[in-house]
Structures are given as C-alpha cells and as structure tokens.
Amino acid sequence: MKIIDFNIREIAIPLKEPFRISLGVIEMAHSLVIELITNEGINGLGEAGPSLIIAGEHIGGQKVILEMLAKKIIGVDPLDIEKISHLIKKAVPYNFAAKAAIDIAIYDIIGKTYSVPLYKLFGGYHEEVETDMTIPLDEPEKMAKKAASHVNCGFEILKIKVGTNLKDNSKRIKAIRDIVGGNIKIRVDANQAWSAKQALEHIKAIEQYDIELIEQPVLAADLEGLAYVTKNSPIPIMADEAVFTAQDALKIASLSAADMINIKLMKCGGLGEAMKINTIAESAGITCMLGCMVEEIGIAILAAAHLAKGLKNIVTTDLDTPFFLSDVPVKESLSIERGKILLSENNGLGINKIDYGSII
C-alpha cells in the first residue's frame, strides 16, 4: 500500500461565545482537515487545529507546512509509521499541529487496514472515556451559573479557568463550589498566570474548596518554579504548556516538577509522540490527561479519545471543545452524553462522514 495523494480543507467555525483564559480570548475554531489517499482505497483523516496563544501557530502557516509534509510522504507505505514519523520530524522543526494532522490520518489508515477501532490498537484498557467541562474566565456569578448548567447536563468534573487576582479567583471557586455541591470534582487551570510564590498563595486560598488538581500554575519555561510548587502544594499539580514533546516530559520527570501531565495532540505532534510522553510519565509514576485546543473541530478530539480509552496511564480527559462550537462537522461520529465520550466500533477513527454544511 502506498500514499498517492491528499486533500486539504480549511475550516472556520465560530464559537458559541468568546472563550476567555488568562492568556487571551478565542472566538473562532480555525482548523485544517487532511485526507490521505492510498492506492488501495483506504483513506485516512487528520486535523490540524493550531493555537496562536498556546503554541504560536497560525492557520496560514500551518496550511503551507501541512501541504509540504503531505508531499514528503507520497509514495510511502502508511504502515511504515516509524519512517513517516522520521520524515515529518526531519522536514521542519516545531509546527506540531501540522505534524499531528499527518500522524492522525496515518493512524486512521492503520486502524482501517487492520479492521479495528483505534482504541483497540492502542490497548483497549478503559471501558469508557469521561471528559470534564471547562468554565471560561468570567465574573464569579456567571461562571457559577454555567457550572450549574453543565452539572445539570450530567457533567461530574469541572475545569475552572482563573486569572491573576487572588480575591477574584477565590470568589469564582467559592461560588462554583457552593452551587454545584460537594460531589462534583473541581479542577483549576491558571494557564501560566502566577509566579511560584503567587501559586502557593492562590492554592492556600482555595484549598478549602476541595480542588482535585491545579493545572500549569507558572510560566511554561519555569520548570524550577513548577517543581517548587509541586513539592509544596497540598493539591496535585499538572503540567500543560510546559510539556510539548517527550523530551519535555523527561525534564518534568527528572525534576519531579509535576504530579500529572496534560498531553495535547496539537502540542506534541500527534498520537505517536503522545504515546512516548505517556510512557515516560508512566515510568516516572506520573499520570496523564488527554486534553485539546479550543481550535479543534472534532477529528482530533476523536483521535485523543481513542488514545485515552486505550492507555491505562491516561486517567482522565479534557475533551470538551465540541460544546463550545456553533457546529460540529463530525457530529454523527462524535457523541458525548453526560460527560462520556461514546466511541463507535467502526474501524480507525470511526468517522462516517464530515458534514461541512454551512461551515465557512
């Protein structure tokens, strides 16, 4: 089998409302969909959802890179995954979203070739995949109202975005805990908003509200600060923006800088690198979460969910982007009910069709 051609389509989907975090505001999911075509009629779908505020990647640049990478693998057997991984890594540094699109499409082909859903290929460990629901940064009362609405829809885990002001953050967490009660898990995501000293002050202030974990409290480059917070925090600490690659995960492990790692396919370059990160983390006694970017439109969400269902050390997910989109082009294949992502038994990613409809 050989890859003989490819198609790339650019998609822009407005969010239902602006998504605000400490790093900025997102109003549009702008993504690229690639279809890799083989000479045996087994085609694979992948997605690049570049994030400007997280990874510094822009849709225009990623489109150029994605086309270049796709041309690099024309004539290659898609089952030769190690060869393809080497070719795309060697072709250009960084540009993880474009690399992820190629990688996801290759794995989709592999699953279809061996007639299994991808989660079986990855290990088939978990019976179900449960996602949290993110509450974007806003006034405490508005965030609490959204939290209650999501809990009423069946979500049992909430991820709360916070900012730099300690008093405001405490009000946000208190308002949410008061309205959802004690049985709902609450995670807090600072998106690099604090210094190490500030992080411990914030953690002390909100510890009373039974917080499950604190995500990326300090700047991504401040691994020493992250390690200091992890060592002194009564609440588990998760690294997110500090980990793009397996090498980053190794640094985190060697410094004992986090209790958990948030793996995102658009950060690391796809499923292959995600598995390497997870293996390093598991060897160091660090559990993992599978997360996503708000810019993803569904294909990459399915890929991440399959990986999360397959691997034992991926103990939770943050794959809630479909709820923020005004439309989901793979809604027939991506089903989320009461916080559970329901994966089909169809081969590969399990995507039956992409309904572009009125999508830009």
Image (cartoon, helix red, strand yellow):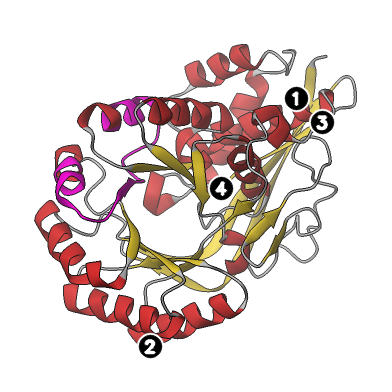
Label 3: few (<14), some (14–19) or many (≥20) C-alpha neighbours in 10 Å:
many
**Residue sitting nearer the eye, 170 or 74:** 170
Question: Going from the N terminus, do you reach mark 4 or mark 3 first?
Answer: 3
Instruction: Please state the horizontal and vertical placement of residue 95, each as a whole percent of the image.
Output: 47, 34
Q: Secondary structure at mark 4?
A: loop
Identify the residue under disc 3: 43
Picture quadrant where residue 42 is located: top right
Identify the residue under disc 4: 49
Q: CA distance from mark 2 to mark 1?
A: 48 Å
Q: Are the residues at dot 2 and dot 1 in contact (C-beta closer than 8 Å)? A: no
Magenta-colored span: 227-252
Question: Going from the N terminus, do you reach mark 2 or mark 4 first?
Answer: 4
Which mark identifies residue 110? 1
Amino acid type, residue under disc 4 in the picture? Gly
Amino acid type, residue under disc 1 in the picture? Ile
Q: CA distance from mark 3 to mark 1?
A: 10 Å
